[in-house]
Image (tube, rainbow, N blue to C red):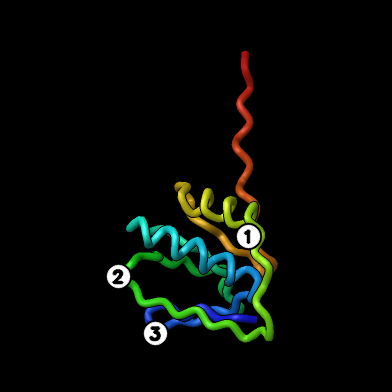
Amino acid sequence: MGRLIYRDRATFDIDDRVLAHLRIVIMNKLRRNEGFMLQVPVNEGVRQASLWIHASNALVLQFYGGREPAIDRELVDQMMHDASGSDGLTLSGSGIAAAPAAPVRHVR
């Protein structure tokens, strides 16, 4: 289990595998000077917290696992896609949350 520390004020426990993928997404988005919204699960009675990820906000990623997780390129691509969307990137307890289904439109 790793940890994301946001602006020296808030900490979020995130699975090392998910955190390793998130690290790649953050590096790439900030390298392009693109901020994005990140929703992370919270355990203290709050469903999730929304964080604005931008170069002006201090972030620390801490990994506690004994070995580096294998990187899944498809997962990185999906996370990059979600981070670029209007709802941002949503993490769940086990990884990334499924994107909400598009509303069904009936053709008459």
Q: Earlier in the sequence, mark 3 or mark 2?
A: 3
Give the Cα distance between marks 3 and 2.
13 Å
Which residue of the protein is positioned furthest toward the left in this rendering? 56
Q: Which residue is mark 1?
A: 96
Give the Cα distance between marks 1 and 2.
24 Å
Between 104 and 2, the residue placed more toward the observer is 2
Between 107 and 97, the residue placed more toward the observer is 97
Compared across the picture, whether 41 is left or right of 53 comes to right
The amino acid type of the residue labelled 2 equals: Ser
Compared across the picture, whether 60 is left or right of 101 comes to left
Between 98 and 75, the residue placed more toward the observer is 75
Question: Quadrant where the N terminus lies?
Answer: bottom right
> What percent of the width, then of the height, locates residue 58?
36, 77
What's the mark number on residue 56? 2
> What percent of the width, then of the height, locates residue 49?
50, 69
> What percent of the width, then of the height, locates residue 74?
64, 52
Q: Earlier in the sequence, mark 1 or mark 2?
A: 2
Question: Label 1 neighbourhood size at 10 Å, few (<14), some (14-19), many (20+)?
Answer: some
The amino acid type of the residue labelled 3 equals: Asp
Compared across the picture, whether 48 is left or right of 94 comes to left
